[in-house]
Image (spheres, rainbow, N blue to C red):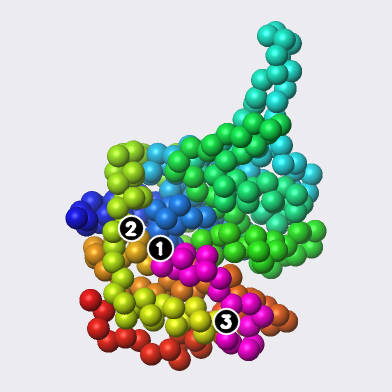
Amino acid sequence: MLELRRFAEYRERVVDNCAKIIVGKDDVITLVLVCFLCSGHVLLEDVPGTGKTMLLRSFARGVGGDFKRIQFTPDLLPSDLTGINFYNQKTGEFQFRPGPLFANIILADEINRATPRTQSSLLEAMEERQITVDGVTTKLSEPFLVMATQNPLESYGTFPLPEAQIDRFFMRLSLGYMTEEQEMSVLARPIAAGQPDTLSRVVTDDETAYVRAAWQEVRMAPDVLRYLMSIITATRSQGSLMTGISTRGAQALYRACQAFAAINGREYVLPEDIQYLAPFVLGHRLSAGEGGAASAREQLDRILERIPVPLETV
């Protein structure tokens, strides 16, 4: 039986801890937490200076994970991520030096500035949760979360992620700007008070292990599951969309709804959970051709408005 109290306490502690640094973005922090519980990865698209690095550093401090930041540039090589075997002259043997991917929480900053070869090495680690160097495969430690960032406004000198690789991300999120009042409070506080290093760990490894496994016990009623599948099917038959949602995308939405329901104190999924999470989980998996991402989001909104919501949910 689910211990919903443990989920609620976990969410409250992690979100409140991050909110000390990231002001007014509890909803985004909660969605990052959902990705973390589901072993998914985040694509964060936003303009520079909105707190993307601060968000993940604060999250890592709260859950106690080993955090690494990688600045992606055109000259970054796959071995710069995975690590290399080097010859140790003292021992006379080759020795493996692990790269930054051997951490729990990774910030891949400006992922679209690296070459496709380097992007692929990161995405392989995300999917397989293992790294192979010179024929030797090493499993990555859990939990393992990658948050990759992109600047949606600047495309000069970048290597856009192919749609097949974007599909590997569990959610696409955006922090956006704070309200005027929130930003004034951030400007007025001491510089030291706004640093993630001032935060402490707020959850234990046992608590993390429980919430990352137990959310799978959340149930979804047949009518609600049929509603979810109606949305997925509609994206595949929408003529203005070049590609619909794959089975992997449908699984991601199902899992996200389970975890979201659990941290909101429920043993069952509501249709409102599906409506809320669908744009974050499905939006980046759709392609509208020349219309671009904005057109794909509009098409998804129309689908959500058109499909009738089941009245009985439990």
Q: Earlier in the sequence, mark 3 or mark 1?
A: 3
Residue bounds of the magenta highlight = 237-255
Measured from the top left, where is residue 198 in percent x and y?
41, 40
In the picture of the structure, the residue carrying the numbered disc 2 is 216
- From this view, report whether residue 309 is shown above or below residue 191: below
Badge 2 amino acid: Gln
Q: Earlier in the sequence, mark 2 or mark 3?
A: 2
Observer able to see residue 158: yes
Q: Does residue 154 appear left or right of residue 189 in this picture?
A: right
Name the residue rendered at 76%, 59% in the picture: 158
Badge 3 amino acid: Arg
Question: Camera-side residue: 233 or 166?
Answer: 233
In the picture of the structure, the residue carrying the numbered disc 3 is 236
Circle 2 crowding by C-alpha within 10 Å: few under 14, some 14–19, many from 20: some
Which quadrant of the rendered structure holds the N terminus? bottom left
Examine the image and state in which quarter residue 193 appears.
Answer: top left
